[in-house]
Image (cartoon, grey):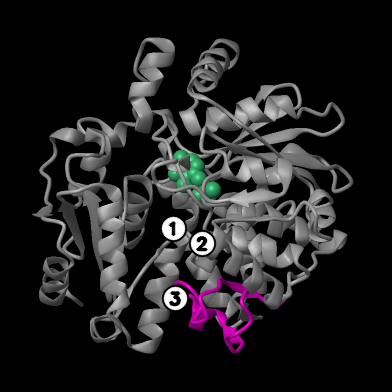
Amino acid sequence: MRYVSTRGRMSPAAFTDILLEGLAPDGGLVVPEFYPRIDRATLARWRTLDYAALATEILAHYCSDIPRADLDRLTHATYTRATYGTDAITPLSMLAPGLYLLHLSNGPTLAFKDMAMQLLGALFEYVLAKRGERLNVLGATSGDTGSAAEYALRGRAGINVFMLSPHGRMSAFQRAQMYSLQDPNIFNIAIEGVFDDCQDIVKTVSADLDFKRRYRVGSVNSINWARVVAQVVYYFRGYFAATRSDEERVSFCVPSGNFGNILAGWIARQMGLPIERLILATNENNVLDEFFRTGRYRVRSSRETCATSSPSMDISKASNFERYVFDIAGRDPDAVRELWRRLDTRGEFDLSATPFWDKVRASGFASGSSTHADRLRVIREVLLSTGTIVDPHTADGIKVAREHLDERVPTICLETALPVKFAETIVEAIGRAPGRPCAYEGIEQRPQRCEVMPVDAQRVKDYIAAHAQ
Ligand SMILES: *Cc1c(COP(=O)(O)O)cnc(C)c1O
């Protein structure tokens, strides 16, 4: 399998060549040259595989330059009972007849991002060792992504992590999760500013190409292709868990922000998994819901992006969306370049009056959005009817899934985090805090280490230079 850019100006590259990269050199996103089609016989064979073996099968199509035996070793080292607490890795439970919840948040940082990030850590370490290279990962986080990256890369040979976070602006739990890591390859830098300041510093440092090359600076952001493809695995697993035969169809409902999670569902559908609908749920920041209802994709300014009680979905533009649009545009890079040129100049494009709109309508997507009040109500109702507490992001998904129920086809809601990460909202909804997995008891009391710095890219560069691999 080779990879090309959505903007068409990158020569085809192998998986291990794109693994460590962010944007394609032409500013686009890397995509596989085609989606492998999985026939019914293969689907039937995959139904009985355990999570790691299924991950090997799916990834083998996309990572054809990694020997299968090596891939198998990496997936089996990643998807373990020790890390996820169950043999199923992603268990399925019933919320109501025809409505299921796929549990994706039993990894080390209690959010679905671990599902992909843990494998990414293993893949990075493997490829760097093969090439005799080292890497310094630089990132900015407002909470979830940074901790998932740190727990995936802690203790890995040849990799240091420099993670910027806004000083004093994360919850005590999130701070403890990141800053209590004592691994010598993890460096937390608390910036005296907001998340956007952290993000800007990362951009400034990455724009200094000499520095980037000299210190082998890389990233693990949401556009990383390996993260997307690792997520494809749980759509297959969820499908097998909710059905008995490959004649049946299911729908998935996905709380969405950067369009990374649901993009994996789109890829699973393109591969031939019998998915009826992909139901996209947003919170008040409804950029994507607006697109799927009207055809208009209008990115928001940071002023227009509100801080909500499902903060991991507070996005102004959806970084992975370009990959879907590339497929809708018949994989024509000229069309994608033109649409993104319009987006850069006018802040929006509208597909409703173009031939692409029919393709969007036929692509199986539905959408809806949710508010703070909806979230609280769903958390209360799900607790009453099932005894389970769901987190606010998952609640956004359940709210929208209920609006699209179809009695012929079961709907699987993806759980994107555990409620303990968002205890304040849970207390507001049900009057008490959610329980904590025992590994996290007293985490706020553990010793923490982090470096506090002003909003100053040069200071961050000096720090990386002094501590780089
Ligand atoms: C990252 C995240 C999301 C959004 O996922 P995308 O892949 O960006 O669409 C939703 N919920 C939680 C809890 C997250 O951490």
Relative to 199, 378 lies left or right: right
Q: Earlier in the sequence, mark 2 or mark 3?
A: 3
Tell me which segment is drawn in magenta: 6-33
Q: Is residue 130 visible?
A: yes
Q: Position of residue 220 (x, y in %)?
A: 40, 64
For label 2, the residue is: 227
On screen, residue 313 above or below 433: below
Contact, CB < 8 Å: mark 1 with mark 3? no
Q: CA distance from mark 2 to mark 1?
A: 6 Å
Of badges 1 and 3, nearer the viewer stands 3
How dense is the environment of label 2, judged by Cα within 10 Å: few (below 14), some, or many (20 and up)?
many
When asked about the image quadrant of residue 127, the answer is: bottom left
On screen, residue 72 above or below 314: below
**Closer-to-camera residue (175/326):** 326
- Magenta stretch mostly in which secondary structure? loop
For label 1, the residue is: 117
Contact, CB < 8 Å: mark 2 with mark 1? yes
Q: Position of residue 124 (x, y in %)?
A: 40, 72
**Closer-to-camera residue (91/420):** 420
Q: Is residue 290 magenta?
A: no
What residue sits 42% from the left and 31% below the top?
A: 308
Q: Amino acid at mark 1?
A: Met
How dense is the environment of label 1, judged by Cα within 10 Å: few (below 14), some, or many (20 and up)?
many
**What is the number of the mark on residue 125?**
none
Relative to 54, 174 lies left or right: left
Judged from the image, the secondary structure of the residue bearing numbered disc 2 is helix
Q: Amino acid at mark 3?
A: Glu
Q: CA distance from mark 1 to mark 3?
A: 15 Å
Of badges 2 and 3, nearer the viewer stands 3
For label 3, the residue is: 21
Q: Amino acid at mark 2?
A: Arg
What residue sits 53% from the left and 32% below the top?
A: 394
